């Protein structure tokens, strides 16, 4: 399979944040699909955590406890999550967080994974920041993320932006017809070298 043939889903979670003695939990999930050149939101839901949202996290994403009171738990959404992710490669910006929250579904078998953070670092090691928003801005992609209701640190918006970034990185590097596995193992040598200077 070539990179251009990969069935893609971008996954993003927003979380309750860390607090002393409390484990972080997801409070929003979204999955975006790349379908014949367009991006569609396949899943977008708030999630009810077992603890309050940390103040610092609420300042980042703007999601408070009141909005989550009647939301489903992540495990309640298993059929929708499975339908949205099964049979697709999963893209995420800083995929370790998304992988961690998917542990709620043991042996889910989702993947392979594409980390757009690692790809951006490999292809643009000189950028001062590789956060999703900063990378999109630095690469001049802000207008491509424009859609009704778009805002950073909203799971659906970030999943949408992840696919915009992924397709830009593939197009600019001219690797669409290369083997799909190339995306799963980017060479970060130039990034680490630039950080040692």
Image (cartoon, helix red, strand yellow):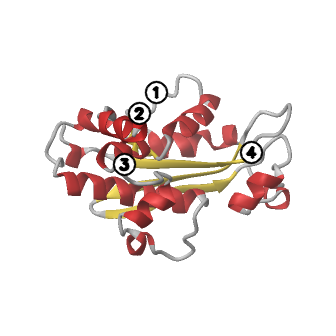
Q: Are marks 3 and 1 in contact (CB under 8 Å)?
A: no
Q: How many marks?
A: 4
Which disc is residue 17 wearing? 4
Nearer the observer: mark 3 or 1; the answer is 3
Q: Is residue 39 above or below residue 180?
A: below
Residue wearing tag 3: 120
Residue wearing tag 1: 109
Nearest the eye: 123 or 48: 123
Give whichever of discs 1 and 4 has the lower sequence position. Answer: 4
Q: Which image quadrant is residue 90 in?
A: top left
The residue positioned 27% from the left and 60% from the top of the image is 36
Say which element carries label 2.
Answer: loop
Residue wearing tag 2: 111
Give whichever of discs 2 and 3 has the lower sequence position. Answer: 2
Q: Is residue 26 left or right of residue 109?
A: right
Q: Is residue 44 above or below residue 113?
A: below
Distance between the alpha carbons at the discs numbered 3 and 4: 25 Å
């Amino acid at each position: 399979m070539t990179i251009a043939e990969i069935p893609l889903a971008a996954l993003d979670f927003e979380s309750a944040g860390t607090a002393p003695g409390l484990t972080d939990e997801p409070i929003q999930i979204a999955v975006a699909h790349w379908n014949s050149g367009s991006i569609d939101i396949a899943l977008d839901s708030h999630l009810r955590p077992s603890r309050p949202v940390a103040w610092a996290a609420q300042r980042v994403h703007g999601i408070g406890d009141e909005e989550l009171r009647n939301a489903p738990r992540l495990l309640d959404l298993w059929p929708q999550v499975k339908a949205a992710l099964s049979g697709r490669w999963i893209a995420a910006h800083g995929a370790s967080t998304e992988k961690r929250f998917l542990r709620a579904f043991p042996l889910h078998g989702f993947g392979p994974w594409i980390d757009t953070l690692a790809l951006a670092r490999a292809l643009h090691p000189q950028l001062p920041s590789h956060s999703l928003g900063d990378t999109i801005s630095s690469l001049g992609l802000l207008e491509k993320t424009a859609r009704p209701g778009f805002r950073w640190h909203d799971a659906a918006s970030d999943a949408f932006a992840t696919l915009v970034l992924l397709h830009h990185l593939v197009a600019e590097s001219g690797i669409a017809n290369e083997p799909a596995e190339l995306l799963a193992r980017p060479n970060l040598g130039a990034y680490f070298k630039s950080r040692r200077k």
